[in-house]
Image: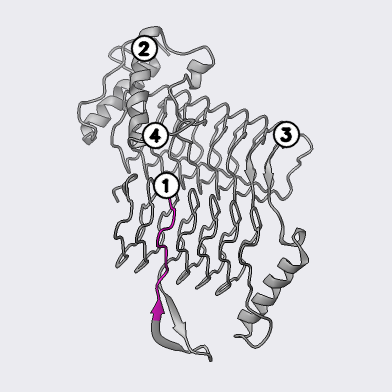
Amino acid sequence: MPSVATAPAPAPSYLRPDQLAEVLDRHARWIKGQPGGARANLALADLEGADLSQRDLRGARLVGAKLARCRLSGTNLAGADLFGVDLRDADITRANLMQTDLRGARLRSADFSNANLRDADLRAGTLEPGGSARRGSGPDAQDAETTRQTHRTALARLQGGVTAEGGIPTDLTGAVLAGANLTEADLCGAVLQNADLTGAVLTDANLSGARLNGANLTGALLDGATFDNADLVGTRMVDCDLSQAKLGSACLTRPIDSMGSEIQRAIFDHERWIDSVGQRGERADLDGTDLSRADLRGVNLSAASLRGANLADAALTGARLMMADLSGANLERANLMGADLSGANLSFARLAGADLTRVNLGPAEIKDPSGRPTGRSWAANLMGADLRQAMLTDSRMVQANLTDADLENADLDGADLAGAKLQRAHLKGKAPRRR
């Protein structure tokens, strides 16, 4: 591609359709080396919901751009600067993202099925060189300084005034990467919780320190992939050949059958107690029990006593914990996606960094001993809970007691807080995205 002047982004962050069309037309001419061409500079632009499918956007500058729910199917973004971009819920199927700079990007629930991410840079967002610049083929000194300043602006927006140690992790939570080519991709420290990586090619990819709780890697090619210090609690790795993978100090799941017989029996008896409406088995008393990294996906511990239990990094996706007593429990970084915690007592529980996406924290319906509704309900109690940086996307928190709770930098996009008690709650941080 020719090395000519870059077209500046329009002053306002929101582009009219005619402005966008002009930028794209000039970029197409720049790609072809035609007169009047200029590299697209859409840094910090608001393009939410735009249709950019099948476009040739090689080398385009999209630093910090808002591309949530955009259509980019089949789009060529090879070598593009996508530092800190917002691509949540976007359609990026079959797109070419070879050698793109995606550091610090928000890619939650994006669909990358069959996309080419070979040699893409998906590390945390920092001001150090990334993408092609890191590989020694970056822009000249003047252009590099302009890029650095744009990255600085995008990073400040991502941080929301809070300086994150190690930078802003690239967020691929719930993203669909089925069949994607991630050969030699740098995913160091990336968040891939509940991501779908079935059949993905991760040959020689760097996943050191990545969070893969609840991710599905069924049938993925992992030859030469590095998982040193990666969090693999609750990760599904069926039909994966790990003989050539480098697991290093990866954090692995503790299956229930690897725990003490008393814990296994308590969970089994509790589920019998629930199923028989208290006629058989007995209610579980797991107060203070160490269940860290435990694989408890889909377990039914409704009404169980788990006061002060250690559930840090546990896999609890789809678990049923209605009216369970988790007061003072440690649930830091636990994966609770889709769990039912209606009416649960989480007062003063530690939930920092936990994934509570689509969790039910609304009121629980109270029933009589025969199982019939009484017309009364019991609200979830999160008084004084530590929810810093927790993911509460699309969670139901109707009537929940959040008095004195710490929600600093928690992601509340789409959360239903109708009737919730928020007295003295700390809500500084991420504002819900526009819908």
Most extreme residue toward the bottom, as rendered? 370
x and y percentages locating residue 348 in the rendered image: 46, 59
Q: Nearer the viewer, mark 2 or mark 1?
A: 2
Residue highlighted by disc 1: 89
x and y percentages locating residue 401 in the rendered image: 36, 66
Label 3: which secondary element: loop
The majority secondary structure of the magenta stretch comes to loop
Quadrant, the N terminus = top left
Label 3 vs label 4: CA separation?
30 Å
Residue highlighted by disc 3: 246
x and y percentages locating residue 108 in the rendered image: 46, 45
Residue highlighted by disc 2: 143
* Mark with earlier residue (3, 4): 4
Q: Nearer the viewer, mark 3 or mark 4?
A: 3
Residue highlighted by disc 4: 85
* Mark with earlier residue (1, 3): 1
The answer to which quarter of the image holds residue 347 is bottom left
Label 2 vs label 4: CA separation?
20 Å
Judge from the rendering whether residue 99 lies leftward or rightward of residue 7; answer left or right: right
